[in-house]
Amino acid sequence: MLSAAGLAAVVLSGCSTFGSVGDQDTVDASTEAASQLQDRFEDLPGVALAEVRYQDDLTVGAQLRAAVEVEVGTDVQFTLDAVEEACWRSEVDPLDELVIVVSTRTEPLTSETRSYDLDIGADVSGLTERWGERP
């Protein structure tokens, strides 16, 4: 049975590594790769804000989520493609699910989302055809 202090430590540790599917070194490396992607996306033309998160646990598996806000007038499709390609070609591994959202920051609000379940062969085939094999 967990003591109150033990339970608090488990709760405060966060969900990103609790019940992790991969080993901690792998999770840490993929988390660092996600951080590098975020820095890269912040440098894209017209990007106002980027947030990239990697999570590898029993509830969602190995998931990479990229949310990017762009200024009005920015080519959303170009940004979406650039983010998708960089995520696909990244060192994040393992990767079971990829979710990308690009939205405008101000009126008129628009948002484009791409979501891929990499356990589905068609999703993997489509991404491989567009961007090549993953590292």
Image: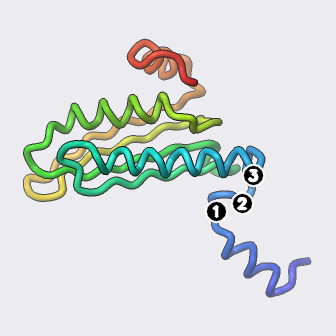
Q: Which mark is residue 24?
A: 3
Q: Secondary structure at mark 1?
A: loop
Q: Is residue 46 left or right of residue 118?
A: left
Q: Quadrant of the C terminus?
A: top right
The three-letter code of the residue at mark 1 reads Cys
Residue 9 placement (x, y as % from top left):
75, 77
**What count of labels does the image hold?**
3
Q: Residue furthest bottom?
A: 4
Residues marked 2 and 1 touching at CB (< 8 Å): yes
Q: Which mark is residue 15?
A: 1
Residue 12 in the image: above or below residue 120: below
Q: Which mark is residue 122?
A: none
The three-letter code of the residue at mark 3 reads Gln
Residue at 38% across / 16% down in the picture? 130
Marked residue nearer the N-terminal end (1 or 3)? 1
Q: Residues within 10 Å of mark 3 (few under 14, many from 20)?
A: few
What residue is pinned by disc 2? Answer: 18
Q: Is residue 63 left or right of residue 42?
A: right
Q: Quadrant of the N terminus?
A: bottom right
Q: Nearer the viewer, residue 49 or 102?
A: 49
The three-letter code of the residue at mark 2 reads Phe
Residue 107 placement (x, y as % from top left):
8, 57
Q: For the residues marked 2 and 3, what is the alpha-carbon distance in whole angstroms?
A: 10 Å
Q: For the residues marked 2 and 1, what is the alpha-carbon distance in whole angstroms?
A: 5 Å
Q: Secondary structure at mark 2?
A: loop
Residues marked 1 and 3 touching at CB (< 8 Å): no
Q: Residues within 10 Å of mark 1 (few under 14, many from 20)?
A: some
Residue 78 placement (x, y as % from top left):
22, 32
Occupied quadrant, residue 74? top left
Residue at 41% across / 33% down in the picture? 86
